[in-house]
Amino acid sequence: MDVTAVTTGGDAGAASRSRLYLLLAQAFAFPDEEIFASIGEGEFALAVAEACRELPYDLTGADIAGLASAGESYLAFESEYIRLFDVGPMGPPCPLYGGVYGGDRMKVMEDATRFYNFFHLRVAAPGQDLPDHITTQLEFLHYLTFREGLARQEGVESAPLVRAQRDFLGRHLCRWVPQLEARLSKQEAAPFFVALVRFAAAFLQRDRAYAEASAA
């Protein structure tokens, strides 16, 4: 999904939520040496902590410390990502595709695509992440929250954007990320990935509750 030009919004709370969605999307993508260095040097955890301070709700109970635990080797970090999320004899133990977690995967992808198309977005190109991949879905929420902040800054109605966030979270990420967290708990996973999934699950649930209250 091409949302690379989206960087911040006009409303501080929406901008922080948008920033967190972008940070999570970057962290769940296949890791390169740049993100590994950012994690190991503490920059990623610091960016998450800074965004959390501006949220319109309290997320102080979420574990952020583990988000600085990259380990000593990029190759080991990459291999752990592949082992957990990318490959396996019957698929990876913790897939990052929401449609895998019960139901009809094609219908899940079609439903997600309808959301994207409604906002004139599409998955960027063949060979890139599918509509039900966590990075695609997080980027979509990054876009919606950015648009929400901009609408508030300009005095434009933001309720439809908040309702879209509420509905998309309920029908997609908040439906399957808790299952991802449960699967990961059965693996002896590297600390960073445990912390990442745990933080994502806590943030998504809290943000859904915020969207539900705001859209009422």
Image (cartoon, rainbow, N blue to C red):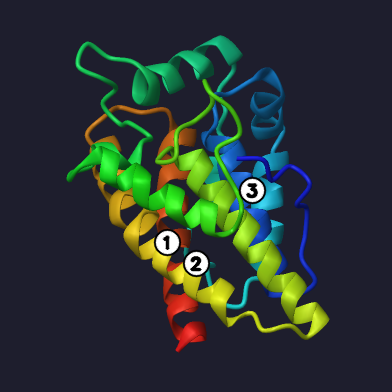
Total of numbered circles in the picture?
3
Q: Position of residue 57 (x, y in %)?
A: 56, 77
In the visual, does 79 lie left or right of 145? left
Circle 1 or circle 3, nearest the eye: 1
Tell me the amino acid under the disc marked 1: Phe
Would you say residue 181 is visible in this rendering?
A: no
* Mark carried by residue 22: 3
Res 140 seen here: yes
Where's the C terminus, which quadrant? bottom left
Name the one closer to the observer, 124 or 133.
Answer: 124
Gap between marks 3 and 2 measured at Cα: 15 Å
Marker disc for residue 168: 1
Query: Could you say which is closer to the camera, residue 140 or residue 91?
Result: 140
Q: Quadrant of residue 168?
A: bottom left
The residue at the point 52 percent across, 84 percent down is 214
* Residue at left offset 55%, top offset 33%: 69
Q: Are marks 1 and 3 in contact (CB under 8 Å)?
A: no
Residue 184 point in image, percent of width and height: 29, 36
Image point (44%, 47%), residue name: 113
Say what secondary structure mark 2 lies in: helix
For badge 2, the amino acid type reads Gln
Query: Which percent across, then down, holds residue 27?
Result: 57, 37
In 3D space, how far apart are the residues under numbered discs 2 and 1 (Cα atoms)? 5 Å
